[in-house]
Image (cartoon, coloured by chain):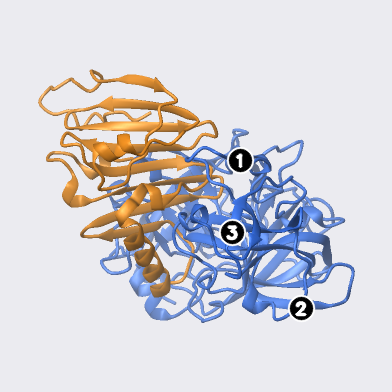
Amino acid sequence: MKNPQMFPAFIFVPAIFLGCAFSVGCGGSGSNSTPPQTIASSGNNVASISVSGGLDGFYADAAFVSVTVCVPGTSTCQTIDNVLVDTGSSGLRIVSSALAALPLPQQTSGSNPVVECFPFVSGYTWGPVETADVEIAGEKASSTPIQVLSDDFTAPSGCTGFGASQNTTLDANGIVGVGLFTQDCGDYCTVVQTAPGDPNLYYECSSPTVCAPVGESLAQQVPNPVSLFSTDNNGVIIELPTVSAGGEPSVSGSLVFGIGTQSNNALSGTTVYTADDSGSFTTTYKGTAYPGSFIDSGSNGYYFLDSSLTGITECSDATGFYCPGSTVNVSATNQGQNGNSNTINFSIESADTLFNSNDSAYSDLGGISGTTPQNFYFDLGLPFFFGRNLYTGLQSTAYPNGYWAY
Amino acid sequence: MSEARGGFIRSGLAIAASGLFILGALPAWASLGGDRASVDADQVHLQGTRTTKAVESYTVHEIQSANGAVVREYVSAEGKVFAIGWNGPWMPDLRQLLGNYFEQYVQAAKAQNAARPGRRPLLIEQPGLVVEVGGHPRAFTGRSYVPEMLPQGVRAEEIR
């Protein structure tokens, strides 16, 4: 933690932003009437989350939660800790080695096990689709398809072609995708794709080594588990406190289920920014709009544009991270598909300096999104969640592609 | 479709659009580092359209699937595939697109993840291979090129 006086750049920041930087109550909305942040601490719809470094202690800027999975309809359960909270995807994925011997039923197509290959930017997860009762806090999603990450079946080339396997490299016991969409894939996966440019995500395996693409109905696909809760099933709020410049060893907060369903999850006082059909909105920086931008708790930093556009120096060793000589303040404008817009302000400090602190929570960690126009966007990762209650609304009739609100 | 960016056309050579033509449902996939003959030999059925655009020192083959996945292949005047770009709701088959460079990419991605755990845009910058992958599920983007294969005068920023 550093003294703010070390940052001369702050002198030039408008007073309203200074208020934001040091007030728990600032939601970054650019309005000085924002009420203080309240983090829900109790309720059947409230799960504790922590930003504490994960399994090996040095997974920075990632929020983890405990999830209980049960054999459907029974009390044969296991609680899995260190599950990454990811608003950038949908679906619960658990590493098989963390599941011990819990006998979850295998989903089948005919008599063949259904196995999924799910692509992330970092690589893919592969493993059977099994059915579980999923319990988080006081909420329960009954008979929910989940992905169990294992190599018991040999991943076909259509899967391994996504890149690196993440089955054993998540640095977490799983990922709980609580994003914008009800299913992890959606209509695209209800039929087998045959064009070479269109990959398949679901397979049926007639033997441990022979897997062929299969169409999965929406109900069979791995869903955002929140969508199957009996109540509080229309979205989540991530509530994390402000993190000081320079980082903190760890912080904790809440994952609140439901939006506008209880006294602790009202949407009032926020602004809704709707997403497009690919789960993105537009962030404008220095007069240029970047329509592929998004908010994602599963990204562990602010990732945006590149040095040529931001003027922020890249690290010489930590590829892709920003390493400015002194803290840089960034201002940009988020705009939803619905036209609502909001100016955001954040800071970027040298990743080298931050990583040397061995903290787990950094409010000012960032890097580039890419080096070519199609990879220019704002990925507002977990640091964007610090100090503001951030709502991720599930797709619905009113919001076909879901929304963010803060 | 790909466009020649303003900064690329040098010395008033306005030939960017001269080679533009569109072929319906013509199948062709190439691998990074492969040659044009392999493009034509690798005839697979593609449910989409291919657009070919010739610019000063290379040709861009853009293939779009019915589901909105787009792959762009950059072929030099000598007939070598020196770069690949893609975007779409899901990841493309990088083994096919990167060809002999695929394993190098996978090993580099694993090493980077091991060095610093976290989920973020993936950027591999090695002397012999550049790969970047970005976006999120339902909206992936990426590109790859072999620096030493870039035709003279072609800037990396043109590859998208």
Chain to which the residue tagged by mark 2 belongs: A
- Identify residue for label 2: A78
Q: Going from the N terminus, do you reach mark 1 or mark 2 first?
A: 2
Please name whichever residue, A391 or A81, is drawn nearer the observer in this view of the structure: A81
Q: CA distance from mark 1 to mark 2?
A: 35 Å
Quadrant of the frame with the N terminus of chain A: bottom left
Relative to A187, A355 lies left or right: left
Numbered circle sitting on residue A275? 1
Q: Secondary structure at mark 2?
A: strand
Q: Is disc 1 in the same subunit as disc 3? A: yes
Work out whether residue A284 can be spotted.
no
Residue at 35% over, 40% down: A373
The amino acid type found where label 3 is placed reads Val
Chain identifier matching the blue colour in the rendered picture? A
Mark nearest the camera among 3 and 2 is 3
Mark nearest the camera among 1 and 2 is 2
Relative to A8, A151 lies left or right: right
Q: Secondary structure at mark 1?
A: loop
Q: Give percent across and percent down for residue A119.
A: 53, 55
Chain to which the residue tagged by mark 3 belongs: A
Please tell me in which quadrant of the rendered image residue A236 appears. Answer: bottom right
Q: CA distance from mark 1 to mark 3?
A: 38 Å
Up the image or down, A161 lies above or below B18; here it is below
Residue at 37% over, 32% down: B62
Please tell me in which quadrant of the rendered image residue A251 appears. Answer: bottom right
